[in-house]
Amino acid sequence: MASELYGVLATQSGSGAPHSSIVAFVSADDLTSVVFVTPRNTRKFANIEARPAVSFFVDNRSDRVDELMRVIGIEAHGNAHELSAEQGCAYRALFLAKYPQMSGFAQAPGSALMRITVSHYDVVDHFQHVLVLPAGGRA
């Protein structure tokens, strides 16, 4: 998961309408956290404020049909929330270590540093083999 640059965040509006968006992310805390940055004026931020339960999906696909059985998909389930300036110091440093070119965006006054506290992961390989792991990766 750490080697991937982008994942898909799935949220729900207050009325339950689904919304998916691509985000740059960093995993942290022995895989119990996923951290990303978003502007506060986005639909995903409003959805998280209304319903913090989210899922986050990342995979290693190459868009080659002959490699389908080698694709691994990971879905993280958890709750997301904005980190305060004090809480976010170490997480922001991790994010910027992976994405130094996003410094202006990550530190803009209108941007929120978000943390997903992961409860568990669904890991899919060989197209349909599913393994459920608690956060931290211990089976």
Image (cartoon, rainbow, N blue to C red):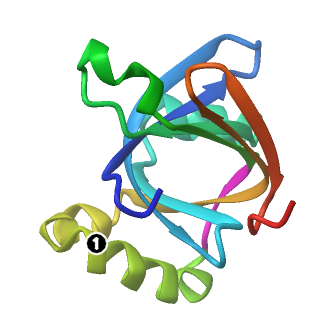
Pointer 1: what residue? 98
User: Residue lying furthest left in this view?
Assistant: 101
**Segment tinted magenta in the rendering:** 79-83
Task: Please identify the dominant SS of the magenta region.
Answer: strand
Please tell me which residue is depicted at 37% across the width and 72% down the height of the picture. 95
67 over 93 or under it: above or below: above
Q: Is residue 8 magenta?
A: no
111 over 7 or under it: above or below: below
Please tell me which residue is depicted at 35% across the width and 52% down the height of the picture. 4
Considering the image in quadrants, where does the C terminus appear? bottom right
19 over 138 or under it: above or below: above
Instruction: Give the amino acid at mark 1.
Output: Lys
Q: Left of 73 or right of it: where is 11?
A: right
Residue 74 sits in quarter: top right
Q: Position of residue 87 (x, y in %)?
A: 62, 83
Q: Position of residue 6 (x, y in %)?
A: 34, 45
Please tell me which residue is depicted at 82% across the width and 67% down the height of the picture. 138
Mark 1 residue crowding within 10 angstroms, few (<14) / some (14–19) / many (20+): some
Please tell me which residue is depicted at 74% across the width and 56% down the height of the picture. 118
Q: Position of residue 20 (x, y in %)?
A: 50, 23
